[in-house]
Amino acid sequence: MITLFWACLAGGALFAVVSVVLGDLMSNALDGLLDFLSVDFLQPMVIASAVTAFGGAGILLDKYTDLGWIAVLALAVLIAVLLGAAVYFGYVKPMANSEVSTGFSLQDLAGKVGRVTVAIPAHGYGEVMVRIGAGNTNQIASSFDAADIPAGAEIVVIDVKESVLRVSQFEIGKGDEQHA
């Protein structure tokens, strides 16, 4: 049994070192090979942590306790599962949730507020800057209301048609006067 624990400890530690040093090369070489393991918690880091913890816990429990091999095996498995869960919920999941993408669809801009950078004539095109995600995007725009919109005016994107934002001047309080 001690041989199994040492093999798990060494194998997990070796996997950790190899994945740090050769991570990108391995990921390109195994592209798609392990896609069947697409369950969220079966991340290589979680599995390697659990296997390493199993081996280390087994060695320590075997050496420093008088427990039988079944109890040592059961406790080592329990420790491995707990440490794997801790790695998943403490590191893997928060890091996956913190990813920020700069990609967007023009359809995502509907309802967003922006500012006119190049004046928009009543029956022509201008340019607007809209904040999306962590940055700004400049897009071609036309007037939804067929009214001139000067540069610097605040706008709201009404819809997108043929890759052109159709915007209307954003006037705070315009609708509030009717309800007062």
Image (cartoon, rainbow, N blue to C red):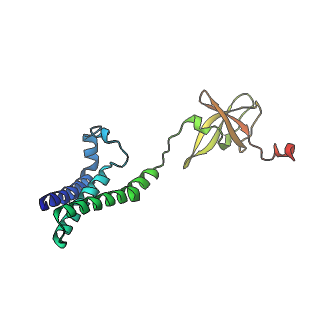
State the residue in front, 25 or 63: 63
State the residue in front, 164 or 125: 164
Query: Where does the image place residue 153, in percent across and percent down from the top left?
Result: 73, 44
Residue 79 sits above or below residue 166 on the image: below
Residue 120, quarter of picture: top right
Q: Is residue 159 left or right of residue 177?
A: left
Name the residue at 26% across, 52% down. 19
Q: Is residue 179 left or right of residue 1?
A: right
Task: Count the labels in the image.
Answer: 0
Name the residue at 29% across, 50% down. 44
Residue 63 sits above or below residue 85 on the image: below
Name the residue at 22% across, 59% down. 13
Residue 158, quarter of picture: top right
State the residue in front, 168 or 152: 168
Residue 115 sits above or below residue 6 on the image: above
Query: Where does the image place residue 160, in percent across and percent down from the top left?
Result: 63, 31
Q: Is residue 96 left or right of residue 57?
A: right
Residue 8, quarter of picture: bottom left
Residue 145 sits above or below residue 89 on the image: above
Query: Where does the image place residue 96, in percent across and percent down from the top left?
Result: 42, 50
Instruction: Look at the image and tell me in which quarter the N terminus lies.
Output: bottom left
Query: Where does the image place residue 17, in percent across and percent down from the top left?
Result: 23, 57
